[in-house]
Image (cartoon, rainbow, N blue to C red):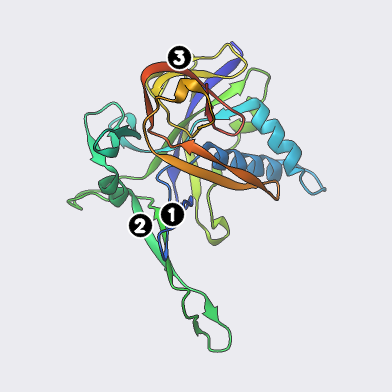
Amino acid sequence: MTWTALRWVWRLEAPLFVGMPPAGALNRCRPYVPARVLWGAVTAEISRSRNSENFPDYGKLGWEVALNCRFTYLFPAEKRGDKFLAWMPKFERMRGVRWYCHGGEESLSNRDFRRRLLDSRPGTAIAPESDSALEGTLRETECISPWWRDANCRGKPNAMLLLGYVFLRNNGFRRQLDNIDTLFVGGDTRYGLGKICRIEWYDVSGDLSVFGKRVHLDGEHPEIQSDIVWGHVLEGDRPEIHGMQGAKELLGGRDHGSPWRGALTWAPGSFLERTVAWSIGNYGYWMM
């Protein structure tokens, strides 16, 4: 096989912020960690761990990580007994996005799921001349909480976990990841946000299954057979995805210090009426 598939589970040690378009004074947070965010965090951690007196070449190492690794998104998960169960999005007609507990029968609306998942942190800018809040800068920032919020608020709180998969080329690159047990992902990491610790990391190549979907590991890119996408898909002009249904998002950002052009994408949870083969690109996009 060209690739090795591994599943990793992370425990959230601090509130985590992964931004999405805001709503007024509220900085909204995504309920998952995109692969591109994970790629950046892994690149930074490997760069810092290498013994060198020179400033790390983040561009070169980032290209190396993108060439040898393919990441799925990290989705919220909880431990029940000895099993880790991830919550996965799915778009449904007339109902919008709903979240399903993988391996279980539970489901929640997007609103109820975000209420169980997210907390908010108030903040404001300080006017230096008065040492008081600067007018018009009061805001709140949504964050994924380190603990699940249960409706009855009884019993021991359940830790927030993040579950996903990584595909590695069979060329020895795994040694670069074996020693990573802590990452800082998302925004505001300098203020203590986004710390995650790895609690599970093992090979699942023999199962040939990712999030319950068939996976092929022999090609140039790992391929997942699925009717639902759990990553962003570039809309483009491909006729094969003209029948896709779901939500659309315009994604943009920065790449090595320079802005990269935004692109219209289908959001995770969008679906087709048939099962097709999806490959995961260098930076986490799902592609046909």
Residue 45 or residue 66, whichever sits in front: 66
Place of residue 52 in the rendered image (x, y in percent of width and height, measured from the top left): 80, 44
Horizontal side of 50 relative to 75 (left or right) equals right
Q: Earlier in the sequence, mark 2 or mark 3?
A: 2
| Amino acid type, label 1 | Pro
Place of residue 248 in the rendered image (x, y in percent of width and height, measured from the top left): 43, 39
- Helix, strand or loop at disc 1? loop
Q: Let me know if residue 136 appears in the view.
A: yes
Residue 231 or residue 164, whichever sits in front: 231
Residue drawn at 38 percent across, 33 percent down: 269
Identify the disc placed on residue 208: 3
Identify the disc placed on residue 15: 1
Label 1 to label 2: alpha-carbon separation = 8 Å
Horizontal side of 52 relative to 237 (left or right) equals right
| Mark 2 Cα-neighbour bin, 10 Å: few <14, some 14–19, many ≥20 | many
Identify the disc placed on residue 119: 2
